Amino acid sequence: MAGTPSPRPAVSLPLGGLVADEELVVAAAGGDEAAFETLIARYQDRVYSTLARMNGMEDAEDLAQETFLKAYRALGTFRQGSKFYTWLFRIAVNTAFSRRRQDVRRKSNEGVRLDAPAHGGEDGERSVRDLIAERGDSDPSTGMDKELIRQRVREGLEQIDPDYRDILVLRDMNGLDYDAIAETLSLTCAAVKSRLHRARQEMARLLKDLADEV
């Protein structure tokens, strides 16, 4: 991998079974590139999907590659006891934010964007994934095509404020808990819950015709 530090003696991994993320991180930090390739294979689809929803499919592959390169170079800063997935997601989100800022600056000089488990709000609110699942489970003779529903949701995500979009993507589509989202976005849990509530309200308004047919 270009630009990566010189490898140190590889750390041996246990044979057989699924190796925990933490063990792979230790091995990768010790110079075992195969261990890091395993981490990439484990999370590349989720990282790509998240970045596509946040910044658009046209930038997602490039941003995903940048995310993993940054993660590789920063392995030495990973704190044991932390969740690798949350740490990696924070890098991905920050990379997406950085690209957005670059795009805004470029445009000003010249003159956004679904299949994890549904996570409804603990307060009874329906998540975006709940809406898709409910419509997809409706009577086939009257129900809308699930791919059409997904397309409408993607269009809705592109229309709402990026701060709301990020919350919906991380919570309703990737299933991160409030603490992980707060850590990823550098917010308080109260701010996360407040933004999520407003984001769901905005998406419900945009998708009102779908909700009315459920």
Image (cartoon, helix red, strand yellow):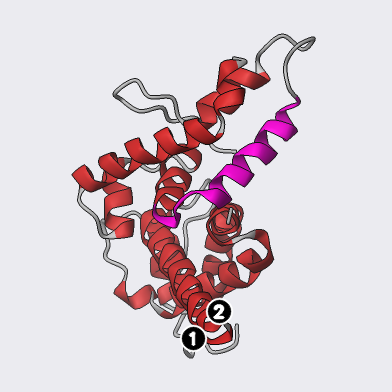
Three-letter residue code for mark 2: Lys
Q: Please state if 127 lies on the left or on the right of 183 as rendered.
A: right
Task: Say if residue 114 shows up in the picture.
Answer: no
Task: Count the marks.
Answer: 2
Q: Are marks 2 and 1 in contact (CB under 8 Å)?
A: no
Q: Please name the residue shown 44% across and 68% down the image.
A: 97
- Where residue 133 sits, quadrant-wise, is top right
Q: Badge 2 is on which residue?
A: 107
- The x and y percentages for residue 30 are 41, 77
Quadrant position of the N terminus in the picture = bottom right
- As for residue 159 lying within the magenta part, the answer is yes
Q: Please state if 72 lies on the left or on the right of 192 as rendered.
A: right
Quadrant position of the C terminus in the picture = top right
How many residues crowd mark 2 within 10 Å: few (<14), some (14–19), many (20+)? few
Q: Please name the residue shown 43% across and 47% down the image.
A: 170
- The x and y percentages for residue 180 are 31, 49
Q: Which residues are magenta?
A: 145-163
Task: Say if residue 165 shows up in the picture.
Answer: yes
Three-letter residue code for mark 1: Pro
- As for residue 196 lying within the magenta part, the answer is no
Secondary structure category for the residue under label 1:
loop
- The x and y percentages for residue 182 are 27, 51
Q: Badge 1 is on which residue?
A: 7
Q: Between 57 and 82, which is closer to the camera in this rendering?
A: 57
